[in-house]
Image (spheres, helix red, strand yellow):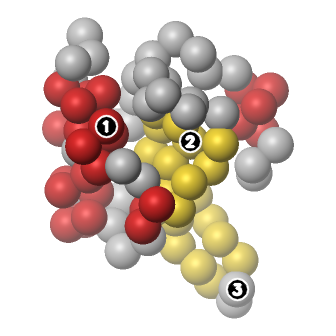
Amino acid sequence: MELINRKDIDIKKWDDAIENSAIENIFMYSWYLDSVCKNWSALVTKNYSTILPVPFSKKVGVKQFIQAPFTREYDILGNEFSWKEAVLFF
C-alpha cells in the first residue's frame, strides 16, 4: 500500500475500482472528490484492488485529514487494507 498524490492517481483504475465494487460510493469517485475537495491523496495497493481517499487541508504547513464538504462517508474498498500500514502514513 502506498500514499499517492492526486496528480499521480490513475483515474481510470480508481473509478473502475469504485464502479466494480460491491459498495459503489459516489463520494469516492475522482470527479466528486475533485469538485468538493481542493486537496486529496489516496492510499492504494499497486493494482488498485484496495483504495481509500485521503482528503486534507493545510494549516500552518501541516496537513490535516478532513471530511470534505457535502461528503457523507468514505469507504475502504478492497480486501488488502492494513491499518498497520496505513498508520505509517499519518
Task: Give the distance between the C-alpha atoms of the residues marked 2 and 1, in whole angstroms.
Answer: 13 Å
In this rendering, would 28 be left or right of 90? left
Q: Identity of the amino acid at label 1?
A: Lys
Tag in front: 3 or 1: 1
Q: Toward which corner of the image does residue 77 lie, by quadrant?
A: top left
Give whichever of discs 2 and 1 has the lower sequence position: 1
Question: Separation of disc 3 and disc 1 at Cα?
Answer: 31 Å
In this view of the protein, can residue 55 be seen by the observer?
A: no
86 lies left or right of 64 = right
The span from disc 2 to disc 3 (Cα, nearest Å) is 21 Å
- Density class for disc 1 (Cα within 10 Å; few <14, some 14-19, many ≥20) is few
Q: Which residue occupies the foreground of this view, 28 or 70?
A: 28
Residue wearing tag 2? 43
Q: Quadrant of the N terminus?
A: top right
Can you identify the residue that label 3 sits on? 61
Q: Secondary structure at mark 2?
A: strand
Residue 66's x, y, as percent?
50, 59
Near-viewer residue (51 or 62): 51
Name which residue lies at 46% across and 60% down: 8
The structure residue drawn at horizontal position 56% and vertical position 54%, both measured from the top left corner, is 4
Front position in the image: 82 or 72:
82
Q: Which residue is mark 1?
A: 13
Q: Quadrant of residue 45?
A: top right
Is the Cβ of the residue at disc 3 closer than 8 Å to that at disc 1?
no
The amino acid type, in three-letter code, at marker 3 is Gly
